[in-house]
Amino acid sequence: MGKIRTPYLLLLPGFGFLFTFFILPILNLAQTSTQTPVGGGDTGQYEQTLRFSNYIDAFVENKEQFGRSFVYALIATLLALAIAYPLAYAIAFKGGKLKNFMLVLVVAPFFTSFLLRTVAWKQILGEEGFVVPTLRNLGIISQSTTLTSTSFAVVMGMTYNFLPFMTLPLYASIDRIDPRTLEASGDLYANGFTTFRKVTLPLSMPGVVAGTLLTFIPAAGDYVNAAILGSPNTKMIGNVIESRYFKIVDYPTAAALSFTLMAVILILVTVYVRKAGTEELV
Amino acid sequence: MSTKIKDASIPHIPTSARISRWIGRNLIRIYAVFAFTYLFIPVAYTFAFSFNDSGKSNLIWKGFTLANWQNPCGAPEVCTALANSIKIGFLATTFSTILGTMIAFALGRYSFKGRSTSNLLIFLPMATPEIVLGASLLSLFLVFKINPGFWPTVIAHVMFCISFVVVTVKARIASLDPRLEQAAMDLYANERETFRRVTLALVALGIAAAALLAFSLSFDDFIITNFNSGTVNTFPKFIYTSAARGIPAQANVIGSSMFFLALAIVITGQIVGRKRKVSA
């Protein structure tokens, strides 16, 4: 076995697989996105006419859902960051002997199906759950206010479901911080807040970047939370793509939307990673 | 180590600062308790309602029963869906772990032309929203007149699991101490023996973790599965489709069992890992 050939031989089967079932489909998707219906054909029959205005039509028709996807995903990401950062900090610096056990606890809810947990939230926050009647009795929300079928519920569901994706990378980078750097900062008369802002936060930036990406990307493309916890008024772009595929069999629009979503996310990710200045992501 | 420094610094600090420091220090612990409670609310809810004497729709608490646990396949389709999920999970885990581990060794062990492009190819599927992965793969299958179903789902799962396996195993390979392999060579082990008895043995835990991750990703996947599985039902699909009319309590039994099983596996894995570290 030649030494130079070894890495390529190791890569070959996996990359062959990824090429066939990841790259080819994406190229095919691009190809589908400019098709138009066959004149006089059945529903679901399309031919290539290189109609690039499919993109404009698809975007204009669904700009509301596009906007909602990115706004929801952004809010959910920020909320998840706010919830996960102190948690990751607590595990890394105060975890002691329980560190590994606490990490298991972060991942553990994962093992109860993602959908079961989302449905559980729907029932907890729903009319039959205990939260809504309690809040109504306490006068915190009005008698007619509901928590499910609202954008609040969708964003909350996304925040909850992607929380471990935020916590783990944050933990990994906070755990790597030498506690002596924080002590040094204190010795130099920095108060707790300054130490956090000038030492802890910059040193944990790789985790912040990785965590926000791992949360934002699946959140922007998600449609399960919106489908279970939302209403027709909280539809995201994922819901539109899904219904274009399965209910309307409008493959070109679904493809154009998918491609736009992917392109926007890739551009955002590239800009964000450049700005945040961490290249060691993979 | 930190306690020593803490003790040394205490005398210099006024009482009020010490109290606020104490609160500050415990505030984050109290916070952690709240955060974990939040994480576990739906899990606890799911577990509690697995004991609900619910009849058809498991929405309102109607009384305690063990019947759902005694007859977890009682609801129609639920065990067929579960069996499919497990089968798909095993196949996807096996293939993605093998392919991913090979890639991880190539990327972690060799420098070669095209290495950064290769890293990009691994990163891309993780940066692509699931709905795009699912929809694009379905389009490809439709072009080749392949009907969505069991094997298309397995292929889809292998595809999105590979990257996660690569990243996990590569991290483990990167943390290896090269001196261990040199030591094996110094002790007259040939290349193959060194690889098998030292390198692979040390990476094995990383591969196991990657396999566990792949299985849980596959088992829990809904979006990509929904696009490529056609009429084949899986456990997440079962929940999604029955969510509208109420999920049978048996699904809660299965969800809770999976939770405890996975927890047991992870904790056992950690204990084994710790023992190994101690004895090494």
Image: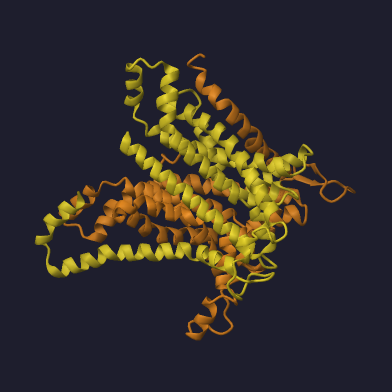
Chain A color in figure: orange
Which residue is painted at 21% across and 60% down in the image? Answer: A191
Labels in figure, total: 0
| Front residue (pair B110, B90) | B90
Farthest residue, direction left: B11
Give residue A148's position: percent from left, percent from top: 59, 72
Which residue is painted at 51% across and 20% down in the image? Answer: A6
- Residue A210 visible here: no
Chain shown in yellow: B
Give residue A137's position: percent from left, percent from top: 50, 85
In the shown orientation, is residue B188 left or right of residue A244? left
| Front residue (pair B273, A39) | B273
Which residue is painted at 55% across and 32% down in the image? Answer: B98
Q: Quadrant of residue B36?
A: bottom left
- What colouring does the structure picture have? by chain
| Front residue (pair A61, A5) | A5
| Front residue (pair A58, B61) | B61
Q: Is residue A127 above or below residue A120?
A: below
Give residue B231's position: percent from left, percent from top: 75, 50
Farthest residue, direction right: A40
Give residue B148's position: percent from left, percent from top: 74, 44
